[in-house]
Image (spheres, coloured by chain):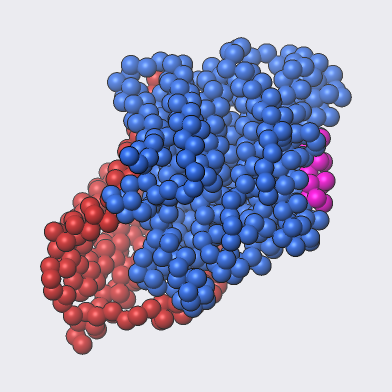
Chain colours: A red, B blue
Amino acid sequence: MFAEWLYFGLAALSVLGAIGLILFRHPMNGAMSFVVTLISLAGMYALLSAKLMFAVQLIVYAGAIMSLIVFIIMFLNIQESDLPEEKGRGLYLVGGVVVIAPIAMFLYKIVRTLPGGDTAIVGNGFGEVRNVGMILFKSWLLPFEIISVLLLVALIGAVVVAGKREVGK
Amino acid sequence: MNHDFLLLLPVIIVGAGAVLLMLRAAFGKLALDSASVVCMCIFGLAFAAQACSALAGPEVPFKAAFNGMLMVTDFTRVAGLIILGCGFFTAMSSRSYFKENRFGLEEYYSLITFAAFGMLLLTMSHELMTAFISLEIMSLSIYILVGFNRRCVTCAEAVLKYLMLGAFTGGFFAMGTALIYGGLKSTKFEVIASAVATHGFLHTPALVGGAFFIIFAFLFKVAAFPFHAWVVDVYDGSSIPVTGFMATALKTAVFAIFANFLMLDPGLKGAWVTYLFYISILTMFGGNLIAIGQGSIKRMLAASGIVHTGYLLIALVAVSADRFTGSVILYYLAAYSVSTLGIFAALSYLSGAGEVRSQFEDFKGLARTRPYSAAAITIFLLSMAGIPPTAGFMGKFYVITSAIQAGQVTLAVLGIVSSILSMWYYLRLIINMYFHDAHESFESECTVFAPACTLILAVAVFAISLYPITL
C-alpha cells in the first residue's frame, strides 16, 4: 500500500517538475526543475523492480547529462536582461491546454484499460544487469546495434554544426 | 545456404560506405569532388546489389539473430531501389551545386549516405522500435543536412522548425509504440496483425491509441493535410539538392513503412480508411491552394509535394490489404521522384551562386539561352502535372484506376480535378521560360555532373512510363 502511494507521489512530482521546466523563465530554474522529474522517474523505476534502469537513470540522466546542461547554462552566464520578453504567454498556455485536453482525455481513457501493475518486488533477478543484458542482446539485438549508427550521426552532426570550417574551400 | 546476407547486402554497403566516407572526411584525405564520386559509387553498388537479388516472396533475414525484426518483400525491395536511385542522383547534382555554393564539406556526402541507410532500414523494419530508431537515423541526418549552410538565416529558420516539430513527432511515435506494447506485450508487426485478425482492431484500446499516434507521426513526415504547414518553409530554407533528396527519398521511405503498417490486416486499414479519405482530399486541395500563391519555385515545388502526398494517400486508400503488393504506390513514388529530382538537379546548376535565381520571374527566357535545360525542366513539370506520355501521367492513371476499382469514385474525380488545378502553377514556369525574352545568360561554372543528371532523369521520365505494372 505504502509503495503504491509512493508511486503516485513520484508520478505527481515528475509531472510537476516537467511543468516547472516549461513555466520557469530562467533556464537554470528550468534545469533544476527538470532534475526533479528525472529523479522521481528513477524512483518509479525502482518501485517497478527495474534496478539497472534505476541506477542508469540516476547516473547518466540526473548525473551526467544534467550536470552538462547546468554547466552550459552557467558557461553562457544568462542574466535576467538576456531573457526574451514573452508577451501573451498566458494566452498561449490556455490555447495549448485547450488543444491538448482532448488528447489527454483520450489517453486517460486508454491508460485506464491497461492491466494494472504491481509494486511488489519481482524476484528471479528481474531488472538486474544480467537479465537486462540477456534480453537486450538476444531479443533486441538489431535495435541495439542500429542505435550506434544513430549516435554516430548525432556525433557527425555536432561536428558539422559546431566545428571549425575553412571558408571558401 | 540461405540468402540472409544477400538480402541485407544493400543496407550493409550503404552503412559501411557511410562510415568510410566519415572516416575519410575526418582525416581530410578526400577532396570534396572525389567524395561525391565515392558517394555515387556506394549508391550505384548498393543499387546493383538490390536490383540483382531477385529472390521471390517475403523473407525474414537473420530470423534467429534479429528476432524477426526485419522483413524483405518485393515492396521493400523496390522502395529500396527508389531510395538508392534518389541518393545517387542527389550526390551527382550536389557536386555541381557545391561548385558555386561553397559551403560543401565531405561530411555532407557521409550524411546523405547515413540518411539512406536509415531509410532502407525503415522500409524493411517489421517492428516498431526498429522503425523508430531507423526513422530517427533518417531524420537526424536530414536535420543536419537542412542546417548545413550555417551562414544563411532562412536555413537556420528551416532547421529550427523542422527539428522542433520533428522531435514532437518522434515523441508521438515513441508514445504510440509504448501504448501498443502496453496493450499487446509486443511491438512486432506480426503480433499486431494477429491480434487485429483475431479480436478486431477496436478490441484493445491501447492498440487504437498507439496506432493513432503512430499514424499521426507518419502523416507529419509525409506532410499530409493538418501537418503540412512546416513543409514550405523547410524546403525553402534548405539547399537545393537536399530539398530534392528530402522531397523524394524521405517520402518514399515513410510511405513504405506507412503502407507496411497500415496493410498489416484489413481490420486495421478498414478502421482508418474513412479518415484517410478526408485527409487525402484536404491534402490535395490544401496543397494546391498553397502552391498557386507562391512566387518562388522552391516553395511552389514544396507545396506541390503536398499535393502529390494527397495522390499517394488516394493510392493508400484504394489498395486492398488482402493481397497487398503496393505496386501503384511504388510506381507513383518512382514517377514523382524522377521528375522532382530532375527539376532540383536542373535548379542546382541554374540558380547560380547563393541560389540567387529563385523566383518564377528569374527564369524568364531560359529557353532562349539554354534550350536543352528549359526542355528538360518542361518535361519534368509536364510529368508532375500528369500529361501523357510521361511517367507522371501513368502514375496518376494507375492511382485513379485503382481508386475506381476500389469503388472510391469520389476520390478519383477529385484527384482529376486537383490535377487540373495543379496545371496552373506548373504551366506558369513553362510560360516564363518560353514566352519571354531573356534578361540574362544563365551562366554557371559548368560542371558536367548536374546537367548529365538532368539528362538521365529526363530520359527516365519516359522510360518509366513504358514500364507496365499490374494493379
> What residue occupies the far right of the structure in this picture?
B435
B442 or B401: which is nearer to us?
B401
Residue A134 vertical position relative to residue B94 in the rendered view, above or below: below
Which picture quadrant has residue B377? top right
Q: Quadrant of the C terminus of chain A?
A: top left
- What residue is shown at x 41% (from left), y 77% (from top)? A111
Q: Is residue B216 left or right of residue B107?
A: right
- What residue is shown at x 41% (from left), y 32% (from top)? B14
Find the magenta span and give its range.
Answer: B416-427
Q: Position of residue B460 (x, y in %)?
A: 66, 28
Residue B101 vertical position relative to residue B386 in the rendered view, above or below: above
B355 or B462: which is nearer to us?
B462
Q: Position of residue A144 (x, y in %)?
A: 28, 49
Residue B133 lies in the magenta stretch: no
Q: Quadrant of the N terminus of chain A?
A: bottom left
Magenta part, dominant SS: helix
Q: Is residue B8 visible?
A: no
Q: Position of residue A156 (x, y in %)?
A: 35, 34
Residue A98 vertical position relative to residue B3 in the rendered view, above or below: below
Residue B423 lies in the magenta stretch: yes
Q: Position of residue B420 (x, y in %)?
A: 83, 46
Which picture quadrant has residue B392? top right
Q: Is residue B335 visible?
A: yes
Q: Is residue B84 left or right of residue B231?
A: left
- What residue is shown at x 45% (from left), y 31% (from top)? B49
